[in-house]
Image (tube, rainbow, N blue to C red):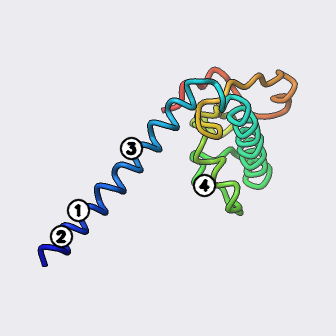
Amino acid sequence: MRRAFIILGLIAAGVATLTASFALWAFFLGQTGFTRGPDNMFGDQYLKTTVALVELHKVRNGAYPHALSDLQFVGEWDRAALMSVKYCAADDGQSYFVEVSRGWMGRPNLKVPPEFWQRTGYRETLRPCP
């Protein structure tokens, strides 16, 4: 019985060490700027996926969703996008604000041209989202 506890303790210590090592590796990798390209690429896709789903919701329902959990027909890949953005809608459901909080590993630095937002309900004035 004692031997089993020692083995379980060693396994737990090994898992904790691996987890801490991975977290440190990810932190330092992010600090080098190495992930900037993938962060921007994933962040751009997450933004466009979210905007497409939000705008489709408005077309179908006449108002923007109050929360992203109100969206219908969300695909499995869409969930990664929705978990990586901050979203808030105006009380009247006629405008919204969205920003990407995480790309691949870190926060992306996106340059979205103003033309992208034409004829959408996006409003910078709704910033910041809770």
- Callout 3 secondary element: helix
Which residue is the site of mark 2? Answer: 5
Which residue is the site of mark 4? Answer: 70
Which residue is the site of mark 3? Answer: 20
Figure check: 42 above or below 72: above
Q: CA distance from mark 3 to mark 1?
A: 16 Å
Q: Residues within 10 Å of mark 4 (few under 14, many from 20)?
A: few
* Disc ID at residue 9: 1
**Is 107 situated left or right of 47 in this image?**
left
Q: N-terminal of the two: label 4 or label 3?
A: 3
Q: CA distance from mark 2 to mark 3?
A: 22 Å
Figure check: 65 above or below 127: below
Give coordinates of residue 38: x percent, y percent. Answer: 71, 36
Q: CA distance from mark 2 to mark 4?
A: 47 Å
Residue plotted at (68% across, 28% down) = 36
Mark 4 residue type: Asp
